[in-house]
Amino acid sequence: MSLPNAEAADLPQGDLKLLDTALAQRLLGAPVARLAYTSRDLTPRLIPVNFLWTGDELVVGAFAGTYKIRDLRARPDVAICIDTADGLPEVLMLRGKVTLAEVDGVLPEYATIQRAGMGDEAGAAYLEAIDKPGLRMVRIGLRPTWVGLVDFQQRFPSRTPEPVRAALSGGH
């Protein structure tokens, strides 16, 4: 169920109810998000990831033994951004700690993501090609503890100057 626009406009940044807005739900259906985390050398990393929104958790599949998994085990605090590039930006920002679960073979959510992105036939061929004995994957799960939403029409970054707000929202 989606929150009415008027009610959603009054929610403060950080409120988990922002996930119930039409904009957030649309962005959660996008194919790619950006995952920010801290690496072993304490410098930031930002990488594009394919993901699946389950309704309460954002899931990313990764291969075991990668630097990303090593770094997330040490520092599970992350930020995720899902946005648009056409017209005025629409931005969904999520924060929280990820959980990691290693599995044998292809992670079911990863299979769903690949079929959605590649199409059923190409996705099935790709999954068959990688699903070999010894394959280990890691399920990266984020249940957001903070949600931010910006559309530059009704929801602006908090310090946007009033003349900018008026110009972008059609006022003079």
Image: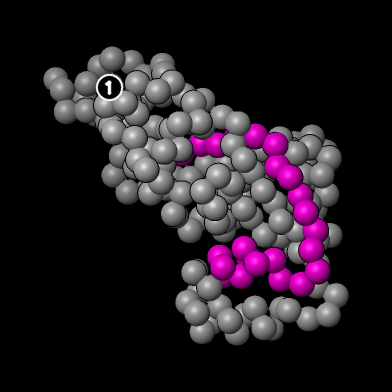
Residue 12's quadrant in the figure? top left
Q: Residue at x 25, y 17 (%)?
A: 163
Label 1 packing within 10 angstroms: few (<14), some (14-19), many (20+) = some
Q: Quadrant of the N terminus?
A: top left
**Amino acid residing under circle 1:** Arg
Instruction: In this rendered view, identify the residue nearer to me: 22 or 51.
Output: 22
Q: Residue furthest front?
A: 1
Q: Is residue 89 visible?
A: no
Q: Is residue 154 left or right of residue 101?
A: left
Position of 142 relative to 107 (above/below): above
Instruction: In this rendered view, identify the residue nearer to me: 1 or 130.
Output: 1
Q: Residue at x 76, y 49 (%)?
A: 100
Question: Dot 1: what SS?
Answer: helix
Colour scheme employed for the rendering of this structure = one colour
Q: Position of residue 84 (x, y in %)?
A: 39, 47
Position of 94 relative to 119 (above/below): above
Q: Residue at x 84, y 40 (%)?
A: 74
Q: Position of residue 63 (x, y in %)?
A: 75, 63
Residue bounds of the magenta highlight: 90-114
Q: Assess whether residue 49 is covered by the magenta stretch.
A: no
Instruction: In this rendered view, identify the residue nearer to me: 120 or 93.
Output: 120
Q: Which residue is mark 1?
A: 165
Q: Position of residue 141 (x, y in %)?
A: 67, 48
Instruction: In this rendered view, identify the residue nearer to me: 3 or 99.
Output: 3
Q: Position of residue 143 (x, y in %)?
A: 62, 40
Q: Quadrant of the C terminus?
A: top left
